[in-house]
Image: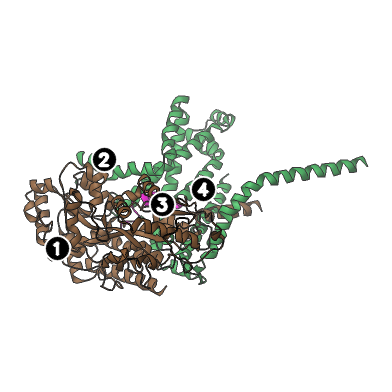
Chain colours: A green, B brown
Amino acid sequence: MTNQVYTKRSRALVRRETTAAYLFLLPSLFFFVVFVIYPMIMCIYTSFFDSTMGREDIFIGFTNYVNLFQDEIFLGALKNTTIIVVVSVPAVCAFSLWVASVIYDMKGAACSAFRCIFYLPVVTGSVAVTVVWKWMYNNYYGILNYVGTKTGILDTNINWLGDSRFALWCIILILFTTSVGQPIVLYVSALGNVDNSLVEAAQVDGATRFQLFWKIKWPQIMPTTLYILVITTINSFQCFALIQLLTSGGPQHSTDTIMYYIYYMAFTLYKYGYANAMGVILAIIIAVLSAIQFKLAQSNT
Amino acid sequence: MKKLLALLLVGAMSLGLVACGGSNTSEPAAEASSVAVETEAATTAGTEAEAEITGENPDITAEISLWTYPVGDWGKEDAVKELIAGFNEVYPNITVDVQILDYAEGDKTVTAAIESGNAPDLIFEGPERLVANWGAKGLMVDLSDIWSTDVSAGIYDSIEAACKGTDGKYYEYPVCMTAHCMAINRDLFEAAGALQYIDEETRTWSTEDFQKAVEALVAYGHTNAGAVFCRDQGGDQGTRALVNNLYGGTFTNAEHTEYTANSEENIKALELLKSMEGINFDASLVGGDEIKLFSQGVLGMAFCWNVGAEKGEDGQSAQFDILPMAFPSDGTPALQGGIWGFGIFDNKDANRIEAAKVFIQYMTQDDVDYAKAVETSTYWPVREISIYEGDEIMTEYGKFMQYMGDYYQVVPGWAEARTAWWNMLQKVGGGTDVKTAVEEFVTTANAAAAAATAQ
């Protein structure tokens, strides 16, 4: 009898706690559904329509998707986006890990100072960062051309953002500088959490510095690496503000990215269905890549 | 199961991040639309057809929104609020909420507002947006009733034509206009011995004189004589006017139904510009950048110019004598016109539509109030009215009004054609054969026009 009463009370307590937990989740769930799930569903739904401003949508099945892969500008944007991701993600990860390793060994104040310096572009508004870079790249009086021509490295000024040979790489460089801040801070923190007893044990066993890093530290910071990889990949895929503010996708579509092309289709040409089809394709690519990164990271740990 | 959920979450997050608006989707509402109606009539929403303008009803009560693109001081909140204060002295029960738009983000803001059902009541811009874009899409109210007033009869015919849609309805009521011109650094021209190639009295020059002037600047050591800016559409009226004027080409046919940029004259003009030392096709600049570089003395001439630029911050900061000029042409120059005025979005609320029409009437029908509205724009009135007597700058720029050319920006599919234009210039600058690039432009632009017409 006593046990039965206790069980009932226990169940009631569990139910009350569960209810409370769900109630706490409710506000977040509401915003998640309204601002993520609902737009996501509408994005997929609209991608099957010829949808534009000022008239009823027309159902066209997979036509938007078929047209996408015959659209040279979209394919070019996909190629540019891929280049940005392929170059930017490994570079950001490798550079931030290297910097973090170096500044982790520094004394407290120096380490904090470097963390602040590298984090500064992250907290600075993208418009402000872009204005500075625009000035540096300026064809007529930019500092890059000034230093280049004064030192004899350049014969004449280069129109960094106006030349299709250089524009994409200029964007990647800015993206790189604005992307490394957070990974560096995360890696410094992750290195601080590495189990020191394992490091000391390896040193006693005669492990080299390389072995120490690769066999002891690297596996322990893998969750951080995975997070950085996923976040950097998503950020690189969604490179938009830099393009809009600096090149508008040009010259000759050399800096078009999928995100910028989506914006152009939706807000300049009002081709909502087509833009949403691109959004779906981009989301699938990001989801697949993130899944692969999860899988690879899992097998390495 | 956890893995599956994690993957689904990644997919959901990334899809959510890239999801963009559709006509039926939950695109975020425009940032500052605070439309509210205080009258009972609001609940019995009417349609455009039901709206009847009274213009003599000071008791009308409504809260309407006005969004303005930065046309002179119509882009300054204080200046617009001052005009509204004058309006509220006559119509105290009509509250007007103002939002200032900019050209970089304005279209996006308006699009988001339209799609979320929060379009402003009144909008202040040109026929390329009000007539050719939103009007053609059936989003605007027909303003024929205001156009039927006696005052409206005095509006210049070319302006009236630009404010009328292909369906015969008026989607814009004009306030001001200007003729976009170009400008040269007079001090530099004098130093380089190039002043001889321009007619300072009429502010005109021939195509040959233009070539000689650029050669003189280059010989003088000023290798950046001018830039055919083409990063995007900002200030693109300048590059279109330059190309069209050199050999008398046109941008569209007279009926404004198809593009004619692939004419021999235009191809010849582009080939000339491409071949000229001192003229750079610069894909890193927009019109605003070019104005800055010109005002700083870096460029010897600006193709994106008008009286607003001279009176603006950049023009005022220039340390040299700015000489506004017509575009070089072997005949009479045809300058690109700029027309700005009011349009009303059909928000299906007869009371707000009527209040918006009352606002337009107040700003445009009475000469005193109209003069204030025009002066705020820093441009010229669209009907005969004396405003700028004794103003030297306005008198100087007034010379160009006689060269006002065809207002062709009302061709259907204009937005896509504009993009194709600067993309074409980038290709020419990048080395693509002019004829090929121009043909591609015309194909794209005409396809856009046909698609828009069919819609």
Query: Which numbered mark, 4 or 2, is in the foreground of this view?
Result: 2
Query: Which numbered mark, 4 or 1, is in the foreground of this view?
Result: 1
Q: Tell me, for residue A143, which label it has, or none.
A: 2
Residue appearing at x 40%, y 56% in the figure: B359
Image location (x, y in percent) of residue B43? 56, 60
Where does the magenta region start and end?
A: A237-254
Q: CA distance from mark 3 to mark 1?
A: 49 Å
From the viewer's perspective, is residue B108 above or below residue B47?
above
The quadrant where residue B325 appears = bottom left
Q: Nearer the viewer, residue A112 or B321?
A: B321
Image location (x, y in percent) of residue A132? 33, 41
Mark 2 is surrounded, within 10 Å at the Cα level, by few (under 14), some (14 to 19) or many (20 or more) other residues, namely some
- The amino acid sitting under disc 2 is Ile
Q: Check contact, mark 3 vs mark 4: CB within 8 A.
A: no
- The amino acid sitting under disc 3 is Val
Q: Chain of mark 3?
A: B
Q: Nearer the viewer, residue A292 or A272?
A: A272
Image location (x, y in percent) of residue B378? 27, 51
- The amino acid sitting under disc 4 is Val
Secondary structure under the numbered disc 4 in the rendered image: helix
Lower position in the chain sequence, tag 3 or tag 1: 3
Q: CA distance from mark 1 to mark 2?
A: 38 Å
Residue appearing at x 53%, y 29% in the figure: A203
Which residue is labeled 1 in the image? Answer: B329
Which residue is labeled 3 in the image? Answer: B90
Residue appearing at x 39%, y 49% in the figure: B84
